[in-house]
Amino acid sequence: MASHRRRPWLKAEDEYLIQLVRIYGPLNWAKIARSLRSRTKKQCRERYHQALKPNLNHQPITPEEGAEIERLVSEIGKRWVEIARRLHGRSEN
């Protein structure tokens, strides 16, 4: 079995992860990780939701989004997961 230590994701791993999510769905991380063999289920889930999910917006934050982030931080604090949910298409990172 390959090492699960943190290291940069390879393009081939990303492509295979996307394929596995299409097959097993975005909830079966244990099965996906067993199939990928080089990553843990947590690493797979985080990589997909923070970098590979098709509806993610990878463009720079707009001035309007920046203002909304500032407003939300003053309202609810640095609860990034909750803030990301309110900024459709953005991850908490």
Image (cartoon, rainbow, N blue to C red):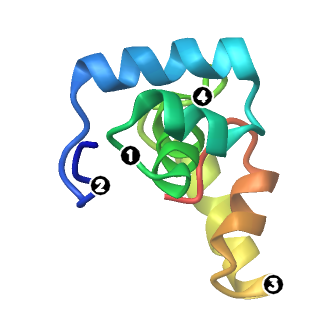
Task: Look at the numbered discs 3 and 4 and tell me whether their residues touch, using CB distance below 8 Å.
Answer: no
Task: Look at the numbered discs 2 and 4 and tell me whether their residues touch, using CB distance below 8 Å.
Answer: no
* Residue that mark 4 sits on: 53
Give the amino acid at mark 4.
Answer: Lys
Query: Which circle's residue, 2 or 1, is located before the other in the chain?
Result: 2
* Residue that mark 3 sits on: 75
Query: Which circle's residue, 3 or 4, is located before the other in the chain?
Result: 4
What's the residue at 27%, 17% (across, down)? 12
Give the amino acid at mark 2.
Answer: His
Element under disc 1: loop
Left or right: 3 as drawn, with respect to 21:
left
Query: Which circle's residue, 1 or 4, is located before the other in the chain?
Result: 1
Query: Which circle's residue, 2 or 4, is located before the other in the chain?
Result: 2
Query: Which circle's residue, 3 or 1, is located before the other in the chain?
Result: 1
Element under disc 2: loop
Q: CA distance from mark 2 to mark 1?
A: 5 Å
* Residue that mark 2 sits on: 4
Q: Which mark is residue 39?
A: 1
